[in-house]
Amino acid sequence: QVQLVESGGGSVQSGGSLRLSCAASGETGRRYCMGWFRQAPGKEREGVATIGRDGITSYADSVKGRFIISRDNAKNTVYLQMASLKSEDTAMYYCAADSSARAYLSAGCVRSADKFAYWGQGTQVTVSS
């Protein structure tokens, strides 16, 4: 079992920055693939970024060049640095972990919500124009 707790959300003006954090506990050694997802009201959950066990990252086109995902395994924490925020980035942001054998290799670390078994409770990001 893996427990995930997000923090760092808030309200910011368009063009601003925020850094989200996701603290993990439990079977942290098996957090092979970590991801950030977001969901806006009335929309489907979107895979924002993932980072594999070896640090390889993947981003949605909508955030490339603006968001950076990173992980500090010593602190059992994953981060999402968000810059140049836009109103369309407004959503609930969720941290997720995939500890399956598939995710051991970065090729198996994909931005599909159904691949992730563990989820945090979410942190709200609101960007005003």
Image (tube, helix red, strand yellow):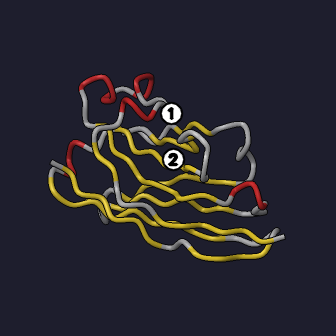
| In the depicted structure, whether residue 110 falls above or below residue 66 | above
- Look at 66% across and 54% down and name the residue there: 67
- Look at 57% across and 69% down and name the residue there: 19
Q: Quadrant of residue 44?
A: top right
Furthest residue toward front: 42
Horizontal side of 107 relative to 47 (left or right) equals left
Give percent across and percent down for residue 51.
Answer: 47, 42
Say what amino acid the circle numbered 1 marks: Arg
Closer to us: 71 or 12: 12
Say what amino acid the circle numbered 2 marks: Phe
N-terminal of the pair, mark 2 or mark 1, is 2
Horizontal side of 14 relative to 83 (left or right) equals right
Q: CA distance from mark 2 to mark 1?
A: 8 Å
Q: Specify the label residue 60 is tagged with.
A: none
Count neighbours of disc 2 (C-alpha within 10 A) and say few if under 14, some if 14 to 19, many if 20 or more: many
Label 2, on which residue? Answer: 37
- Look at 58% across and 44% down and name the residue there: 48
Give percent across and percent down for residue 8.
Answer: 51, 73
| The C terminus - image quarter | bottom right
Q: Specify the label residue 111 is tagged with.
A: 1
Secondary structure state at the residue bearing disc 2: strand
| In the depicted structure, whether residue 59 falls above or below residue 88 | above
Q: Quadrant of residue 126?
A: bottom right
Give percent across and percent down for residue 73.
Answer: 32, 56
- Look at 54% across and 67% down and name the residue there: 124
| In the depicted structure, whether residue 72 falls above or below residue 108 | below
Secondary structure state at the residue bearing disc 1: loop
The reply to whether dot 2 and dot 1 touch (C-beta < 8 Å) is yes
Count neighbours of disc 1 (C-alpha within 10 A) and say few if under 14, some if 14 to 19, many if 20 or more: many
Closer to us: 11 or 19: 11
